[in-house]
Amino acid sequence: MSAIPEESEYKVYGYRWVVTAVFGLVLLVQAFLWLSFAPIETAVETALGVSTTQVRLLALVGPFMFILVSSYAGSLGDNKGWKFSAGIGTVMLVIAGIVKAVTPHVIDSGTAQWWVYLFMQVLGGMGAAFALANLSKMPIKWYPEKQRALGNGLTTMSMYLGTAIGLPLVTAIAGIPEGASQQVAQNGLNNVLLVMGIIMAVTGVLFFVFAKESPPTPAGPMEELANVPLREAFGTLFRSNTFRALCIVSLAGYGVYIGMTVTMEKIMQYHGFTTSFASLVAAGITVGGIIGAGLIPPYSEKVGVRKPFLILAGSVAVPALLIIAFVGNKPLDVGFGILMGFFLLPALPVTFTIVGEMEEIGPRLAATGVGTLLAVGSIGSAGIPLLMEVFARKVDGLTDYRWAILFLAALAIIAVVGVVFFVRETGPKRKEAQKAA
């Protein structure tokens, strides 16, 4: 195995910002496709003449695809290149977007339309998994070693922005008034699908025109070895105590974020607050996460460590959860929602950076590692909100989720303990100490 050259021997290319922009756009708009139905569920029921459960399935089936294909998508990125893997995902997303846009103009039956939308949500979910599995692989190829956390932060921030923008954008495009007729609801839904299809098609063109696999010369340490089969890669990943602990972090982090988001309305109702205020607190978590994802990963580069930021994420999340659940105070709820998002959501890009820096995984298996963490996190985002219902209690006609929030806090504490005892520091300071030794 050849020696890794010093950082000074690598050339940094300004074109990395173009690649980051077009890949970030894919990561942003992929959220639009699976959010095309969630913000206007009632109108979709009216337009298609289907049940609430059927409409809810349109929003949920996509994320479930991450559990099934994320690891394979990451392995493909490691072995064939991040653009190849993300490109397959982009093609899936474009096909899903265009087919959904065309469907209401060629099929009259609402039930038949629903089946087409369901299959396209499955396809789009798979495409999103192929794109997101390469969140950290692109920065490894294009960013110098000391800026890879910045690259991970920017790609992750794009993903969060997609969710934050997608929800109000769908509602605005639909423009469906409450109690609208079937025709009005259908027209609003058709507008959403048309606009989202056009956005996805344009994004796909930009990606394939401007994205490049790697710069002319390596931007940092990137050892290319023989292809590693997925089964063999799994063995390498799960033999590592650090990676197993990061799986717990991903499971708990996704679970806490999604668990709080989907139950926020019930939590605020228990305090006597409105649905609109609950939406404000939930949005505050995401907005705080977007800001944090842009600031914390590059700051971790500046101070040269990773592990403390994972510990900080859980340490802030626990009191924030308890205050939001047990203290019915509007300023505190909003403030601690933003604070929790600011520290909790950036744990994702920091985790991805650690995976790429681990000696046993490193750049070679980074995408497989990230894809596996996404799959584990998706299990958390699907399963933990369901487990919260076990702890929910009915009180005077309202649902009391305080025991469920204690369950989330316990998960966060377990994740912090796992980080403290099993995650090894991988940041620049450790590497500098190793070089000095």
Image (cartoon, rainbow, N blue to C red):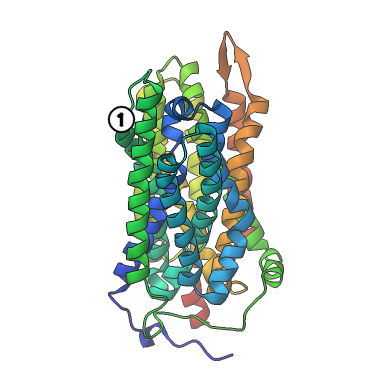
Tell me if residue 235 comes above or below residue 172 in the rendering: below
Question: Which residue is identified by label 1?
Answer: 175
Task: Give left or right: position of 286 versus 55.
Answer: left
One can see residue 419 in this view:
no
Residue 109 at x, y percent in the picture: 50, 33
Tell me if residue 396 comes above or below residue 131 in the rendering: above
Name the residue at the top extreme: 396
Report which quarter residue 369 is drawn in: bottom right
Residue 400 at x, y percent in the picture: 57, 19
Name the residue at the left extreme: 14
Name the residue located 50 percent from the left edge and 71 percent from the top edge: 430
- Which secondary structure, mark 1? loop
One can see residue 406 in this view:
yes
Name the residue located 51 percent from the left edge and 22 percent from the top edge: 266
Label 1: few (<14), some (14–19) or many (≥20) C-alpha neighbours in 10 Å: some
Residue 178 at x, y percent in the picture: 36, 20
Task: Give left or right: position of 242 versus 128.
Answer: right
Quadrant occupied by the N terminus = bottom right
Tell me if residue 301 comes above or below residue 387 in the rendering: below
Name the residue located 61 percent from the left edge and 64 percent from the top edge: 72
